[in-house]
Amino acid sequence: MIFDSWTFLAFAMVVYPTYALLGRGPMGWRRQNTLLLIASYVFYGAWDPRFLSLIALSTAIDYVAARGISASRSSRGRNAWLGLSCASNLAILFAFKYFDFFVGSAVAGIRALGFEANAPVLAVILPVGISFYTFQSMSYAIDVHRGRIAPIRSLPDFALYVAFFPQLVAGPIERAERLLPQLTGPRRVTRDHVRGGLWLVLVGLFKKSVLADNLGRVVDLAFDGSPAGDVAGSTCLFAVYAFALQIYCDFSGYSDMARGLARLLGIELMRNFDRPYLARDPREFWQRWHISLSTWLRDYVYIPLGGSRGRRFATARNLMLTMLLGGLWHGAAWTFVLWGAFHGLWLALHRYWTGLGLSLGGEGPVAIWTQRVLTFHAVCLGWLLFRARDLTQVGAFLHAIARDFVLDENTAVVAFTALFAWLLLLAFESVSRDDDDPTRIVGWRRANGPLLVGTLVLLVVALAPAGERPFLYFQF
Amino acid sequence: MGRAQQQVPVSAGRGNPWRWLLAPAVVVVGLWAMRPATQAFDGWFDLRGPDRAAAGQRGTPGGGDVRSGGAGSGSAASGSREASGPDLIVLGTSMTAAAVAPEALAGDLAKTLGRRVTVRSFARPGSTIVQHLFGVRKLLKQDPAYLRGTTVLVEAPAGRPSWATWSTPWHIPGTTEFVVSLMQNDDLVRLWSSDAPIAHRWSITSAYVTRGYDEWTQRRSIRDHVFRRGTGLADALLRGVLPARRRATPKGPSIHAAAGVGTSGAELARARGEVERELEAARASDPPVTAWGETVFRDLVALVRANGGEVAVFTLPVSSAQSRVLETPNRRAIARAFVPFARDLGIERLEVPFTVGRDDFPDLRHLAVTRRLDFTRALATTLAAAVRSGAVGERLSQGPGAAPR
């Protein structure tokens, strides 16, 4: 059940009015929580009911582990409970997401050395959103261990925290200290919640259906439509630009919708994107891109590894390890590992040269835009690693861009779609200023508000491709 | 209340609420303005397509007459309706669309039988037997006499027609609208009383319930128009700036465009990759043996017969890769069971003698365009022989101008 489907609309038309009705009375929020928990399990079970057991298992493990951590008097006991939580969660993640990858890679490595090797593979379907809810659930146990939050008493409320449907399958990865207090108390849905929520849903729908889905078709055409060496350089370049926008619109569109849907329930989720392609360096990029994951990795991996407290080499190592893990989090493939390594290396180099006092230009507009353009293109190089089928395709695309910059039969459609989508997004962002609050848009209270809303709806109706196209980040 | 909730901004003033009428006005006017620039999407199986008027003037040299279905056709403006349907209707998937040239079939039959023959092909990429049954039903709704005396030829790859039951998915992924455009309300009852996967049942139901949205907005054609025009513009601009890749002059498309897979090298490579993956998956799973009496094909036969027509199946050549898939134990059992089933129901099986080589299936599924006319001729010869022997084609066997039964 994806947000931009008729099925979800039917689901929402049942859940939201019922939620509003149940909210009446002093303990209405408890009834609302029961409804949300049932709705969240129905939402997730619509993909495959068998995977409900996994999410229930993750929930039970972290609930019990957090209670155990809190009840333990010795640090040894607390560590044991935390170890149980982390080991169990990572074991589930490993079994469903990484087992076949590591075993397959090992077998391929042994065969490459000239030995015969065979090993069983599990060949299980990857449960939707497993990386998101596993990280969210695990961070709760870690935060209880660190003493940042107290363990929650109510198992259903904790289950709702793990399975809250707006952000269950593709984030944002919420922290317990932010989301749990909102779930365990009365909520009031105001007029501003409704307006802001609907606005975010519409913006997300526009980014996903109009921009990302149309871009996805031409990106697939360029990356999957021909043998790697058969694509002209111009098509390769436009396809990479198109993918940069597709992945941003797809994921930030989902995040916008998730935040909008939660806001309609009176719950605020964290902002996950902040115009990432305006970043001037890799550090800033990661402060703007998938913020909930980058802060998670910072707080639970990078800082525990030592962060930037050690020597230059230790910092670079910590950055590299964190980003390698971030790459692997996205998927079980060497291209993702390489993508993580690329960002780790880039961050380490950036830290090194800024440590030497080097920078590109000053603070004037030309320097700023030069930095932005260069950073964007480095990010695009990363996206090529991310999207490519394999390393051969990466090499073929780079070679074609450098040595074979001509037209082929797909160049025009890829170029037009990429350019059209970029222009639409720029026009929209220049009007909306990427603001959560639509009333801050110039002229909103006059004609601009309705004109903008009408135009977005028109674009969604007229230009969204037929058929459902899942969000890219569901596979992670 | 949570800390974060306080971040929700509070508006200062409201403005005139009537201004919000502008929003739906923008949508309606925008769609209205875009409509004239686009073409309406007509569903398949429509007696009213523009091809109909053209078809009457498009007689083949041998006196044959041909019509194709109305997919993607223009306005449904044609007024006159035939008293009865064509002599021959061809039903099938993209495999038949690639392998059978309706014009040539009509011409060859006309030459052999010495009379004018009308052929209408509804072979379409992405179609299923359920869609064809619904399509035939739609034709009969428009003209109850349409099938009287008509021979309905159904494709049978390697000698076996579709053995799908009502519990088999009704459409292939991504083509929901094709089946939905032909459905009627009571089909939902049939859908929900089948054992089709819940997700499939739900996707068809939601698409059926909301079909008016697509029809009213005509979003499909608007979108296609915008992107087609934009691509053309980009192409013109880019050609002024960048050189085009030099390629050896192609000898022509490898697969007929009617197969719907595209004919460029890139599209063919992609289609071949997809087919390889599909075949691999199909080889790995052997479907349960289905009784032919429970198939949609049997219901199609019953529908055609009840309305005065007859059904015959014709053998369609398949690639060696595809034939390997058909050789699993259960698939073989299904094929064996078809022979007595067809005999009992009096369904003629046209074994078309046609030899294929390794290079005849560029994407492993569809016959190469260079063999299209050869196969069509072989089919016409086999069919003409069956007509002469009286096995099929009561109307075809009668002289020119024969009236339907």
Image (cartoon, grey):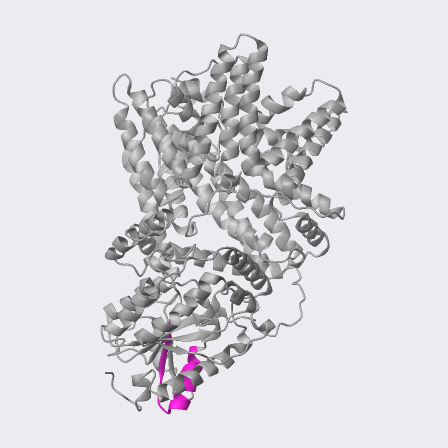
The residue stretch that appears in magenta: B102-123
Residue A310, percent from left and from top: 73, 18
Q: Nearer the viewer, residue B208 or A51?
A: A51
Residue A268, percent from left and from top: 42, 25
Q: Is B367 positioned to the left or the right of B179 in the image?
A: right
Residue placed furthest toward the top? A73
- In this rendering, the answer to whether A118 lies above or below A326 is below
Residue B88 highlighted magenta (yes or no): no
Name the residue rendered at 58%, 75% in the picture. B357
Residue B110 highlighted magenta (yes or no): yes
Looking at the rendering, which quadrant does residue A380 occupy? top right
Residue A298, percent from left and from top: 60, 24
Q: Is B142 positioned to the left or the right of A300 in the image?
A: left
Name the residue rendered at 59%, 62% in the picture. B269
Looking at the rendering, which quadrant does residue B107 occupy? bottom left
Q: Nearer the viewer, residue B386 or B153?
A: B386
Name the residue rendered at 63%, 58% in the picture. A227
Quadrant holding the N terminus of chain A: top left
Looking at the rendering, which quadrant does residue B356 occupy? bottom right
Q: Is residue A363 visible?
A: no
Q: Is B207 positioned to the left or the right of A117 in the image?
A: left
Q: Is residue B311 visible?
A: yes
- In this rendering, the answer to whether A17 lies above or below B377 is above
